[in-house]
Image (cartoon, rainbow, N blue to C red):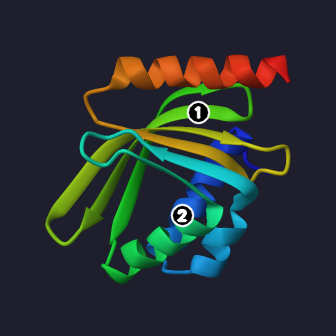
């Protein structure tokens, strides 16, 4: 059994499936009520699980080659902030990601932010944790 927090194991499973082009496995890593927000400049969007799966399929078809996950902060077993860098051909796309998983280890929330928005990403992590503690 891994000593990594549940949220990190879930993120790695999701990324491995995405990079491997296994969209069915990728879909299984997402909770039914998964919510995705992209707050990067020019890419602002918010969508549900099915839309995220559709976008993952497009990304896989475009030839994602790698995804590097660098852990910045982890809060408990279910919340994390990490730097995520995708690679396709000679193109790299770095960003910050705040993720939350449910008790079953499925991704519940994913929020992407620009690579220069570390303070905003930390604030989002704190807000996500505070919201979960109130439930």
Asked where in the image residue 101 lies, by quadrant, the reply is top right
Q: Residue at x 49, y 77 (%)?
A: 20
For residue 102, above or below residue 122: below
On-image quarter of the C terminus: top right
In the drawing, does residue 111 fall left or right of residue 95?
right
Residue that appears at 55% across and 49% down: 36
Report x, y in % for residue 126: 59, 17
Residue 90 figure quarter:
bottom left
Report x, y in % for residue 7.
67, 42
Q: Position of residue 93 (x, y in %)?
A: 25, 53
Q: Nearer the viewer, residue 118 or 3?
A: 118
Q: Earlier in the sequence, mark 2 or mark 1?
A: 2
Name the residue tied to disc 2: 52
Secondary-structure class at tag 2: helix
Spatial CA distance of label 2 from label 1 is 19 Å
Query: Residue at the spot x=36%, y=23% of the render?
Result: 118
From the image, tell me which residue sits under label 1: 80
Query: Residue at 49% of width from left, 17% of height from top?
Result: 123
Left or right: where 67 falls relative to 35:
left
In the depicted structure, whether residue 39 falls above or below residue 61: above
Judge left or right: residue 77 versus residue 11. Answer: right
Which quarter of the picture shows residue 66? bottom left
Q: Nearer the viewer, residue 14 or 44?
A: 44
Q: Position of residue 34 (x, y in %)?
A: 67, 53
């Amino acid at each position: 059994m891994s000593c990594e927090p549940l949220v990190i194991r879930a993120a790695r499973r999701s990324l491995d499936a995405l990079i491997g082009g296994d969209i069915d496995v990728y879909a299984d890593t997402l909770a039914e009520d998964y919510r995705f927000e992209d707050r990067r400049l020019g890419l602002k969007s918010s969508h549900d699980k099915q839309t995220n799966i559709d976008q993952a399929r497009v990304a896989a078809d475009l030839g994602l080659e790698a995804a590097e996950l660098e852990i910045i902060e982890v809060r408990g077993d279910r919340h994390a902030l990490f730097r995520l860098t995708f690679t396709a051909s000679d193109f790299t796309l770095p960003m910050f990601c705040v993720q939350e998983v449910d008790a079953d280890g499925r991704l519940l929330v994913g929020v992407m932010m620009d690579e220069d928005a570390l303070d905003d990403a930390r604030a989002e992590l704190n807000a996500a944790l505070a919201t979960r503690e109130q439930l």
